[in-house]
Amino acid sequence: MTGIIIAAVVVSLTGLILGLFLGVMGKKFAVEVDQKEIDVRAELPGNNCGGCGYAGCDALAKAIAAGEAPVGACPVGGEPVAEKIAAIMGAEVGESTRMTAFVKCAGDCEKAKENYKYSGVEECTVMPFAPNGGSKACTYGCMGYGSCVKACPFDAIHVVNGIAVVDKEKCKACGKCVATCPRHLIELIPYESKYTVKCASKDKGKDVMPVCSTGCIGCMLCTKQCEFGAITVENNIAHIDYEKCTGCGKCAEKCPKKIIHMH
């Protein structure tokens, strides 16, 4: 009986000593936690999409708390989250422009010509290894295999009739689709943009027309209609300066290929 009591005492003392040791070591080597970082992280949506340019929400929270990233850096949270984080950081939100992804192609199954019937892995990222970069005659157009769809964490982009189409209401402008598209057809533009040019071909008009009935031919009629210098033609393709565009629609009315669309 005495042996059992002695063993129990030894075990208890050992546990007590270990507990005290761990407590002292825990305080001595404790990592200081920035309360602002914790509070900022609590306001971030937790999508970890990387649209802010950081590895995830934890990394962004740390950067904001350290003053290395603006309070409105999260594209998913937008202005509501920016305001909450600004209050935590004691900073001003500043002006922010809501952005959305946009696909620069209108060459769907009816409008774009195909050189051959493709049968293989349906993934845009493997098309550079296919003949002519894929079956589509236009080597600038959307291939329609949906690599961007798989990349989007918000179900904001889908392939419709052979081309990718963005749901601007669902889009959070995280930029994952932009980074994924091998033909660089997707860009981020202001949500409030009135008109867009749905083409990315840099070929001359005589080469565009045989491959796509709706491609930009670089005729420059749009530039002659714009009173504000908001649309220019460079490398045979029209470009809109969204800061200058007033949304009057005159360029769209005159475009012979109807490639300028209301957004």
Image: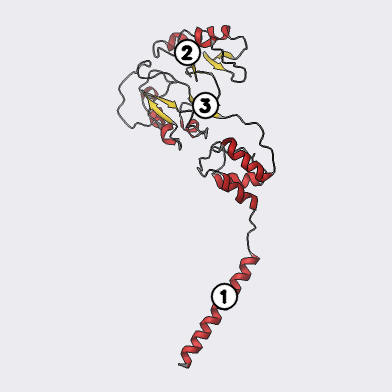
Q: Residues within 10 Å of mark 1 (few under 14, many from 20)?
A: few
Measured Cα–Cα span from mark 2 to mark 1: 76 Å
Nearer the N terminus, badge 2 or badge 3? 3
Identify the residue at image location x=51%, y=82%: 11
- Residue 238 x, y percent position in the rendering: 53, 14
First of labels 2, 1 by sequence position: 1
Residue 10 vs residue 212: left or right?
right
Task: Tell me, for residue 216, which label it has, or none.
Answer: 2
Q: Which mark is residue 223?
A: none
- Which dot, 2 or 1, sits closer to the camera? 1
Which badge, 1 or 3, is on the more N-terminal residue? 1
User: In this picture, is 69 found above or below 169?
Assistant: below
Q: Residue at x 66, y 43 (%)?
A: 87
- Element under label 2? loop
- Callout 3 amino acid: Glu
Query: Could you classify mark 3 by the number of other residues whose Cα lies within 10 Å: few (under 14), some (14-19), or many (20 or more)?
Result: some
Real-space Cα separation, disc 2 to disc 3, in angstroms: 18 Å
Q: Horizontally, is 108 left or right of 187 in the view?
A: left
Quarter residue 140 falls in: top left
Quadrant hosting residue 117: top left
149 versus 203 height, above or below:
below
Q: Which label number is shown at residue 187?
A: 3
Q: Observer-nearest residue: 112 or 83?
A: 83
Q: Circle 3 sits in a helix, a strand or a loop, which is it?
A: strand
Q: Residue at x 61, y 39 (%)?
A: 82
Image quarter hosting the N terminus: bottom left
Instruction: Identify the residue under disc 1.
Output: 18
- Residue type marked 1: Leu
